[in-house]
Amino acid sequence: MEHASFLRQHIQQIVTLSNEQFDIVLQHFTPKTVAKKSYLIKAGQKVTSEFLVVEGLLKTFLFDEKAKEHILQFAMENWWVSDYPAYAKQQSGDMCVQALENCIVLELSLADKASLCEKVPQMNVFFGKKSFGGYVALQKRVLSMMKSSPNEKYELLLEQYPQLFQRVSKTMIAHYLGVSRETLSRLHK
């Protein structure tokens, strides 16, 4: 699907725009192709944009002081991704965003987002609802990590995102759930 029609469908799930308004919206997004294993964002890099995934799969992660990978998020089609604390402050971040498949994303800088919301006020509603939905999902994930058993976390992920298990390795699933690869193998059985 061409990126313009993808973006229009994505936005129209929340707000309705005229053709003229959508033309303004489209001017603020930059399509970008990201090859598998390439980075959209690297730790230490200044983060000025967020990305809407049109096609493909990415992961947001960081390494701890022992070089252990911690996956914060997988982002597939229709999901937004960035190092949001760094993006909000337009500063260097701690996280990496890497393509797990060949991807097409739509880039939106913070400056373009502000300009867009000024020119097309309905986009404030769109971004507000998207942000709120992301906040709810993140809070649910944090609570699940705090209070759920490894088996409960695994079952919830399998229930919510069964397609993820076809697209990423068990090692990555283990890093996302915060369990060892061995524990994940036991849960999978």
Image: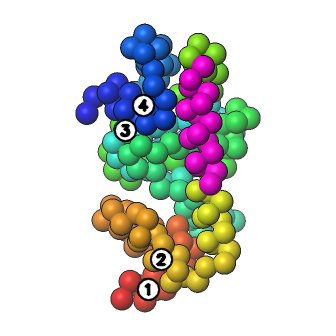
Residue bearing mark 2: 154
Instruction: Name which of mark 3 and mark 1 comes first in the sequence.
Output: 3
Question: Residue flagged by tag 2: what amino acid is it?
Answer: Tyr
Q: CA distance from mark 3 to mark 4?
A: 15 Å
Split into 4 quadrants, where in the image is the C terminus?
bottom left
Q: Is residue 32 magenta?
A: no
Marks 1/2 in contact by CB < 8 Å: the verdict is yes
Q: Secondary structure at mark 1?
A: helix
User: What numbered label is drawn on residue 12?
Assistant: 4
Q: CA distance from mark 1 to mark 2?
A: 7 Å
Residue 88 lies left or right of residue 23; in this view the side is right
Q: Would you place residue 86 above or below residue 31 in this image?
A: below
Q: Is residue 134 magenta?
A: yes
Viewer can see residue 111: no
Magenta range: 121-136
Q: Secondary structure at mark 4?
A: helix
- Residue at figure coordinates x 32%, y 27% from the top left: 5
